[in-house]
Image (cartoon, rainbow, N blue to C red):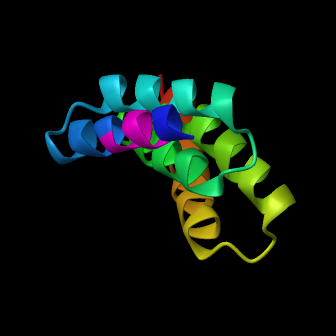
Amino acid sequence: MEKFKRLKNEGNDFVKMGEYEEAANKYSECMKLNTEECTVYTNRALCYLKLYKYEEAKRDCDHVLQIEDSNIKAFYRRALAYKGLQVRKKNLAGI
């Protein structure tokens, strides 16, 4: 559990510095230790949104909502992911 907290804190520090790829990697390491901790999924979803990886963000939010069906951050970030996916579809349609 100590390693989990350390990795999560390192991920949080990377987010504060705007290093979203590194933060996502730390959160992914956390998930190997505990697949039921929703905050690392919503945090990684935030990183994916910042990296324009909308499908990955949506997947993380879907996972959280299977565990906690009323998680507000997961709903909000999934909505942002859907919005990003729609914009991408419109842009591709225009090419």
In the rendered view, does 31 fall on the left or right side of 4? right
Indicate the position of residue 64 as horizontal and vertical percent values: 73, 55
Residue 35 position by quadrant:
top right
The number of numbered discs placed on residues in the rendered structure image is 0
* Range of magenta residues: 5-9
Quadrant of the image containing the N terminus: top right
State whether residue 12 is above or below residue 6. Answer: below
Query: Can residue 87 be spotted in the picture?
Result: no
Taking the spot 66% from the left edge, 25% from the top edge, the residue there is 32
**In the depicted view, which residue is nearer to us: 91 or 37?**
37
Taking the spot 67% from the left edge, 72% from the top edge, the residue there is 71
Magenta: predominant secondary structure element? helix
Taking the spot 45% from the left edge, 43% from the top edge, the residue there is 5
Can residue 77 be found in the magenta stretch? Answer: no
Indicate the position of residue 48 as horizontal and vertical percent values: 46, 36
The residue positioned farthest toward the left in the image shown: 17
State whether residue 15 is above or below residue 37. Answer: above
**In the depicted view, which residue is nearer to us: 94 or 3?**
3
Taking the spot 62% from the left edge, 62% from the top edge, the residue there is 74
Can residue 7 be found in the magenta stretch? Answer: yes
The residue positioned farthest toward the right in the image shown: 66
Residue 60 position by quadrant:
top right
Query: Can residue 58 be spotted in the picture?
Result: yes
The residue positioned farthest toward the front in the image shown: 2
Indicate the position of residue 19 as horizontal and vertical percent values: 22, 31
State whether residue 55 is above or below residue 87. Answer: above
State whether residue 88 is above or below residue 25. Answer: below
